[in-house]
Image (spheres, rainbow, N blue to C red):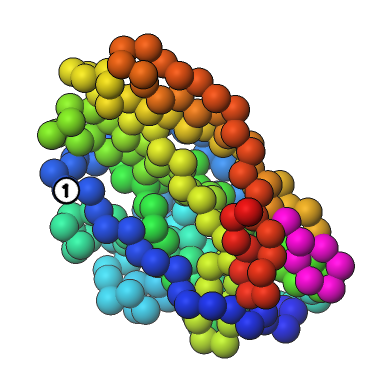
Amino acid sequence: MCEPLALGPAMRRRAPLSAVLTLLLVVPVSAHAGKKSASASGHPVVRLAAQALGGNVRDIALLAVAVPLEREKADGSAALVRLDDGRDGGLPTCYLLELAGKPYGPNKIEAQQRMSVCPAGPPKGAQLSRVAISGRHEAWQVRLESARYDTKAQGGEMAVFWGLLVRSGSEIKSLWERTSTTFKSKTDVALNQAEVCTPPQITVGGQEPDLVTVHCDSETMAGKLPKRAKLTFKSSWAGDRFLQN
């Protein structure tokens, strides 16, 4: 793959919400999702992930796989996996793994990074692809969803994560990420909020990356009345990552 970018600190981990129960997702499976089901314990990626994460193959779900762009002329690949074995307060954890070799026969895991969002229940809606971010650099583009129920606020939360990540040495670093959250309360509409965003639009630069743009429809409550807005967020390249303008 291309020469890695010099990047900043590793992406932060989001702490789980307190007093929440997991919900099932109902979004369609991405075209990038792995061909085998979540119970494909015999898949070589699942076996490698179990060894690396200290889990049982029965607790590992293969969410999606991706390979480099043609222009890279590289043999590596990447996979999104979920570990759900009761650790971390009972919530599942998702990881991006960069692999040596193709997804159907990887030799080893070169690097790994825990994601800040992870789906519970049937792992639907996960996407992983390789995208160009400049004339000479590429990144793994990740999409993940999670749904949870907040017992205190009596409502459901849906979070959608988009991220651009690359390997630098033995680590995977975040270049850009955005998590959009929608919350609907059964008892207090004043708590309701929504943000639904388009996939990131990447303006491919020349030698260096240029711009990432996201368009969002938002809704907040002004008392009991919804206040809607259309928002555009732009993040420009700042040496080692994208920063929101």
Q: Is residue 206 magenta?
A: yes
- At 46% from the left and 74% from the top, the residue drawn is 10
How many discs mark residues in the rendered view? 1
Q: Is residue 167 magenta?
A: no
In the rendered image, residue 179, in percent from the top left (x then y), is placed at: 46, 47
- At 41% from the left and 16% from the top, the residue drawn is 226
**Residue 135 visible in the shown view:** yes
**Residue 46 visible in the shown view:** no
161 relative position to 116: left or right: right
Query: Mainly helix, strand or loop, the magenta region?
Result: loop
Of residues 148 and 106, the one nearer the viewer is: 148
The span picked out in magenta is 205-211
- At 50% from the left and 81% from the top, the residue drawn is 171
23 relative position to 135: left or right: left
Q: Quadrant of the C terminus?
A: bottom right
Task: Kindly indicate the quadrant of the structure image that contains residue 207.
Answer: bottom right
For label 1, count other residues whose C-alpha is less than 10 Å away and answer few (under 14), some (14-19) or many (20+): few
Task: Name the residue type under label 1.
Answer: Ser
Vertical comparison of 184 with 114: above or below: above
